[in-house]
Amino acid sequence: MLRLAVLASGRGSNLQAILRSISQGSLKARVVMALSNVPHAPALELAQAAGIPIWAEDHRTFKSRKEFDAAMLTAMAGKQVEAVALAGYMRLLSPEFLQAFKGRVLNIHPSLLPAFPGTDGAGDTLAYGAKFAGCTVHFVEEALDSGPVIIQAALAVQANEPLDGLMPRIHAMEHRIYPQALQWLASGRLRLQGRLVHLSAPELGEETPEPANPPAGCLISPPLEQGF
């Protein structure tokens, strides 16, 4: 079972989706800690309600990003964390933090990367006039939203669709593809070759997951498996 730390700065809807998939048995993981740079982030309330240990400090009270991330690593020590999921965490991670969990830090972003990185991926998609929006789960590198892509969900932008109409549709897809990607990581099925992420078949003797019904009006690649 994958021992997971979740970093969040806001509402924590993806943390909630992760916890739901764990409780349903589709994600074989345990969230052993939730951390935030926003001491009163609603995500922390979700974690506390689930009995998850939390750590939160205002990053502005630290001299540098490296110092703040070192404090997070210290807080995580002893939790046997195996992977880190960024769930609306609004800061870049230091090279030292990423090295501590090399190849084991994932992020969810509300656009079809590499298009529209940054803090307003969906808004930038609409402002550009793109015809497709979506979300991406990717491995985290030092550069913003630049890491290798694991899974993406694409959906058509409706005529004159406002941001507050598009975002709930994107969030619905985020809440499906993020737990799926984490389960692939937990089962050791992700292989990184350069910038390409390969999804391997289950180990010999393990059950082959059934494909899930594709969401209406949405294209997901690789396809979701049963339970997601």
Image (cartoon, helix red, strand yellow):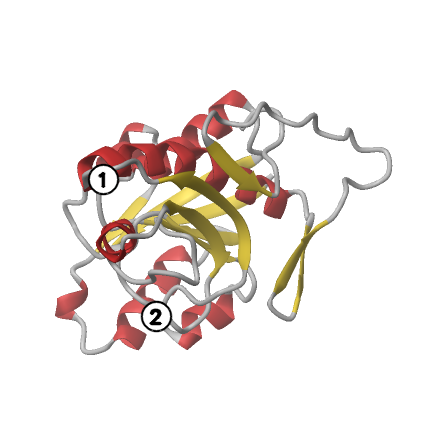
Q: Which corner quadrant holds the N terminus?
A: top right
- Residue 78 location (% of width, % of height): 46, 54
Question: In this orientation, which residue lies closer to the viewer: 80 or 188?
Answer: 188
Q: On the picture, is 114 further left or further right than 3?
A: left
201 in relation to 139, above or below = above
- Residue 189 location (% of width, % of height): 69, 48
Whether residue 162 appears in this view of the structure is yes
Residue depicted at 54% across the width and 39% down the height: 220
Residue depicted at 22% across the width and 45% down the height: 10
Inspect the image, locate mark 2, and give the three-letter code of the amino acid beneath it.
Ala
Residue depicted at 50% across the width and 29% down the height: 22
| 10 Å crowding of disc 2: few (<14), some (14-19), many (20+) | some
| 10 Å crowding of disc 1: few (<14), some (14-19), many (20+) | some
Inspect the image, locate mark 1, and give the three-letter code of the amino acid beneath it.
Arg
Question: In this orientation, which residue lies closer to the viewer: 72 or 121?
Answer: 121
Q: On the picture, is 43 further left or further right than 96?
A: left
Q: Which disc number belongs to residue 108?
A: none
Q: Distance of mark 2 from mark 1, alpha carbons?
A: 24 Å
Give the mark, 2 or 1, whose residue is nearer the N terminus. Answer: 1
Question: In this orientation, which residue lies closer to the viewer: 137 or 222?
Answer: 222
